[in-house]
């Protein structure tokens, strides 16, 4: 089974830029409800910058993820930039030097990204943050790979779990980030970062043809 190479990594990041732009208004509204209303703008700016940096960039998947990570960290003012940037940076280290990523490498990528996010933001699953999308995604990817899933199937399993995780943030009370300032009033709204992370992971599966 052929793995996923730099063409997939580039396509993932470009599809992410497109889908975030498409969902900008929705993400802004989610963040307006429980944050400061800038999440769609923050990520749109960040991923448009990533898309421009990718123009002419070459290398392994890890090289492209690293470029995207440093771009997000330097262009996004909000909490989400350093968090997603750290996730991508740690993910890139996990697959460094590989031209193609097989199912196990994709699990390593997603697990390292989740771990990077957790170590940077100190949020646990259930705290109503983007960890609630990335954590089930990494777990589902691992289970799929163990069951013999192809790379595209591993990513589809991750995307589905992330979407479930994002939906499951709705009743939760936020314990990290700006939404935590609202206390109980944060319940009843979906976390914007979990929602955008589900979009990002769905883009990864689509780029793999799933
Ligand atoms: P800001 O809150 O600085 O305006 P954004 O609006 O871009 O940044 O991003 C908000 C999102 O960041 C939240 O919806 C949440 O998913 C995520 N987030 C905030 N703090 C943390 C944290 N400590 N760990 C993980 N994710 C977090
Ligand atoms: Mg915000
Ligand atoms: Mg902000």
Image (cartoon, rainbow, N blue to C red):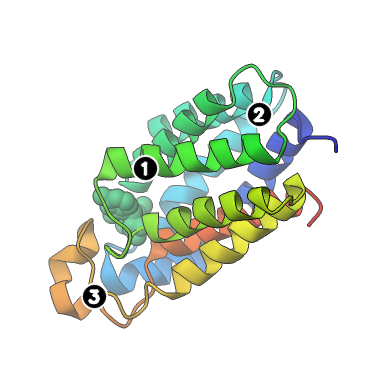
Q: Label 2: which residue?
A: 54
Q: Nearer the viewer, mark 2 or mark 3?
A: 3
* As drawn, 85 above or below 20: above
Label 1, ligand 1: CB separation under 8 Å: yes
Badge 3: residue crowd in 10 Å (few <14, some 14–19, many ≥20) = many
* Relative horizontal placement of residue 42, taking residue 1 as reference (left or right): left
Residue 76: percent from the left, percent from the top?
39, 40
Q: Label 3: which residue?
A: 186
* Relative horizontal placement of residue 177, taking residue 93 as reference (left or right): left
| Residue 138 appears in the figure | yes
* Relative horizontal placement of residue 139, taking residue 105 as reference (left or right): left
**Quadrant of the rendering where the N terminus is positioned:** top right
- Secondary structure beneath dot 1 equals helix
Q: Nearer the viewer, mark 1 or mark 3?
A: 1
Q: Label 1: which residue?
A: 117
Ligand 2 quarter of the rendering: bottom left
Badge 1: residue crowd in 10 Å (few <14, some 14–19, many ≥20) = many
* As drawn, 141 above or below 98: below
Give whichever of 45, 67 is nearer the camera.
Answer: 67
- Secondary structure beneath dot 2 equals helix
Number of numbered discs on residues:
3
Residue 142: percent from the left, percent from the top?
57, 49
Name which residue lies at 66% across and 48% down: 145
* As drawn, 10 above or below 144: above
Name which residue lies at 19% across and 80% down: 185
Query: Quadrant of residue 156 in the image?
Result: bottom right
Give whichever of 121, 143 is nearer the camera.
Answer: 143
Which comes sooner in the sequence, label 2 or label 1? 2
Query: Quadrant of residue 63 in the image?
Result: top right
Name which residue lies at 45% across and 36% down: 72
């Amino acid at each position: 089974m052929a793995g996923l190479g730099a063409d997939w990594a580039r396509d993932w990041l470009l599809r992410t830029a497109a889908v975030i732009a498409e969902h900008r208004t929705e993400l802004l509204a989610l963040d307006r409800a429980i944050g400061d209303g800038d999440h769609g703008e923050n990520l749109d700016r960040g991923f448009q910058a990533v898309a421009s940096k990718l123009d002419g960039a070459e290398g392994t998947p890890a090289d492209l993820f690293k470029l995207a990570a440093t771009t997000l960290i330097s262009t996004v003012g909000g909490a989400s930039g350093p968090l997603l940037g750290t996730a991508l940076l740690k993910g890139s280290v996990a697959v460094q030097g590989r031209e193609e990523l097989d199912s196990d490498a994709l699990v390593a990528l997603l697990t390292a990204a989740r771990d990077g996010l957790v170590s940077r933001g100190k949020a646990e699953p259930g705290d109503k943050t983007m960890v609630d999308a990335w954590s089930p995604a990494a777990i589902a990817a691992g289970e799929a790979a163990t069951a013999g899933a192809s790379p595209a199937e591993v990513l589809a399993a991750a995307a589905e779990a992330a979407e479930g995780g994002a939906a499951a943030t709705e009743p939760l009370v936020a314990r990290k980030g700006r939404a935590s300032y609202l206390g109980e009033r944060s319940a009843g709204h979906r976390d914007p970062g979990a929602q955008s992370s589900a979009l990002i992971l769905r883009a990864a599966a689509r780029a793999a043809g799933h």
